[in-house]
Image: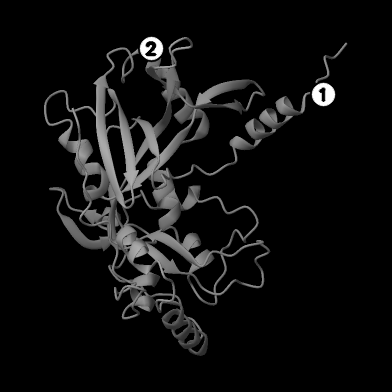
Amino acid sequence: MPNFNDDLDDFETRDEASKAAFSRLKEWRIADGETHYLRLVRNGAINMDVHQYIPTKEKPAECNWPKWPEQMWAVCRRDKAFRLTDEAGNLLDEYEPDFGDCYIHDHYAGIKGKFGKDLSVPAVVGYGLAAIRKVVLDPVTRKPMGLADDTFEFRTPAGDIVTLPKLVIVAQKYSQFWGAIKAAQFLPPYNMCDKDWKIVRKENDLKVTALNPTPDLQPGTANWKRYEQAIELLGASVEDYLMESASREHYRKFFIVGELPEGGYGGGSDDDDEEKDGKKGKGAPAKPATAEVDQDQMNAFRESLTNRAKPADADVAAVEAEVAGADSSVSPVF
């Protein structure tokens, strides 16, 4: 006879597990005053030109989302990652198929943001992959005795429920985060994955601390296989994450006036074909023609952007510091 379960807590857990396969990999966030622990599971960070805090177009009538974002980010479609190279590895003035144009560069140029910066000028951001860690306390003394993975239940395609570590995308600037990571591995084996990292945020500054190396938990060990399993089952790919945010569909969804994403606004679209096309190596013009839009719509949109960009909040200074990411006191501790 089936063993039916009426435990609502278990129901919630299994419901989340069943939806996890369809959930987008989230970016790591740390609030002022918080302390987090991370295990980087990718030895390196992909740096990209990124358009940040870009005002979106007006919510399309075809979109039934309950809340439309006022701002959105996007990978610049003219980033050097999309440029072709010659046999010697030198960059050419040609791009991978479907890249080389950038709607934000072309249509937001000259429009100033809240802090007087040109909205079309991108920032350089580094992207990595990490597992969220948590402190384990001694049951008697209640003192920290180590770190363990923060986990969740996941339903595999075969229907099995497995426990996986929570993975997040780490998107940070060099001065704010990655510089400290690099400083902590200036000696061999140059491995950022063989230790945990303690991060404390105070206002707009991050203090990054390298903890002791863990010989039994690093790439190549048996314990590391749990991260490899999570990456495989979740399809956790920094490259795919960035390709999605650089795709024409992403730009159509949030920025291009008068155009809609082919996948609509229901559950997104499958960009696999676009990604494959972007790796075939066929040349494309360095500056292909951008989409034609109604000029009256565009002029009204630019006026709307200018009005929305005017400072109106009392906390502008605090937001500006966060956006700029400059003068941060990142100090690795060994």
Image spot of residue 78 (x, y percent)? 30, 63
322 up-or-down from 138: above or below = below
Along the viewing direction, whichever of 19 and 329 lies nearer the viewer: 329
Residue position marked by numbered label 1 in the rendering: 6
Q: Secondary structure at mark 1?
A: loop
Which quadrant is the C terminus positioned in?
top left
Which residue is located at x 42 percent, y 43 percent?
Answer: 28
In this rendering, the answer to whether 210 lies above or below 285 is above
State the residue lying farthest toward the right.
1
Element under disc 2: helix
Figure check: 193 above or below 329: above
Image position, residue 65 (x, y; %): 65, 61
Q: Is residue 39 toward the left or the right of residue 258 in the image? A: left
Question: Which image quadrant is residue 109 in?
Answer: bottom left
Q: Does the rendering let one see residue 76?
A: no
Q: CA distance from mark 2 to mark 1?
A: 37 Å
- Asked if the residue under mark 1 is in contact with the one under mark 2, i.e. CB atoms within 8 Å, the reply is no
Q: Nearer the viewer, mark 2 or mark 1?
A: 1
- Which of 3 and 274 lies nearest the eye of the viewer? 3
Circle 2 Cα neighbour tier, 10 Å, few/some/many (<14 / 14–19 / ≥20): few
Q: Is residue 65 left or right of residue 119?
A: right
Amino acid type shown at disc 1: Asp
> As rendered, which of 30 and 11 lies closer to the eye?
30
**Residue 38: percent from left, percent from top:** 36, 32
Q: Which residue is mark 2?
A: 222
Q: How many numbered discs?
A: 2
Amino acid type, label 2: Ala
Q: Is residue 327 above or below residue 27?
A: below
Report if residue 129 is visible in the image.
yes
Residue 130 appears in which quarter of the rendering?
top left
Residue 46's x, y, as percent?
A: 29, 45
Q: Which numbered circle lies on residue 85?
A: none
